[in-house]
Image (cartoon, helix red, strand yellow):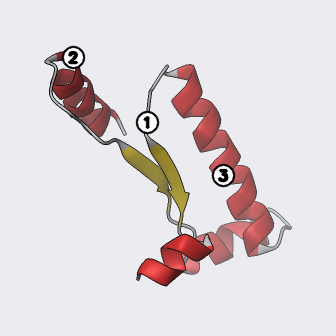
Amino acid sequence: IHIYLCCFSYYRNDGMPVYFLTGTDEHGQKVQQSAINANKSPIEFADDVSNKFRDLISALNCTNNDFIRTTETRHKDAV
């Protein structure tokens, strides 16, 4: 996250228009295995990770334009 944040901050502070989109990738075997290890369903695990990530973004005082999760309908429709 820090490389993107540095680039985003540099360009935005320089007055350039920047659209900062971030989010979470919630598919794959690692998510499935981590959910099993946490005794949760994959979506419950993904919800927890997504909320923690959003909290981190807020704590870093990021001003992202959007946050998307790969489990969202709008993401599924686009890919």
Q: Quadrant of residue 64?
A: top left
Q: Quadrant of residue 26?
A: bottom right
Pick whichever, 45 or 21, lies toward us.
21
Q: Nearer the viewer, mark 3 or mark 1?
A: 1
Mark 2, other Cα within 10 Å: few <14 / some 14–19 / many ≥20:
few
Q: Secondary structure at mark 1?
A: loop
Residue 62, horizontal then vertical, whole percent: 45, 26
Report, in whole angstroms, how far the alpha carbon at label 3 lies from the one at label 1.
Answer: 18 Å
Tags 3 and 1 in contact by the CB under 8 Å rule?
no
Q: Secondary structure at mark 2?
A: helix
Q: Amino acid at mark 3?
A: Val
Mark 3, other Cα within 10 Å: few <14 / some 14–19 / many ≥20:
some
Q: Is residue 50 above or below residue 26?
A: above
Residue 29, horizontal then vertical, whole percent: 56, 80
Pick whichever, 38 or 20, lies toward us.
20
Q: Amino acid at mark 1?
A: Asn
Q: Amino acid at mark 2?
A: Asn
Question: Counting residues from the N terminus, which is met first, the one under dot 3 or under dot 1?
Answer: 3
**Which residue is the site of mark 1?**
64
Query: Disc number at residue 13?
Result: 2
Q: In the rendered view, does 32 fall on the left or right side of 10? A: right
**Which residue is the site of mark 3?**
49
Q: Nearer the viewer, mark 2 or mark 3?
A: 2
Q: Is residue 5 above or below residue 32?
A: above
Report, in whole angstroms, how far the alpha carbon at label 2 lies from the one at label 3.
Answer: 29 Å
Q: Quadrant of the C terminus?
A: bottom left
Residue 24, horizontal then vertical, whole percent: 52, 57
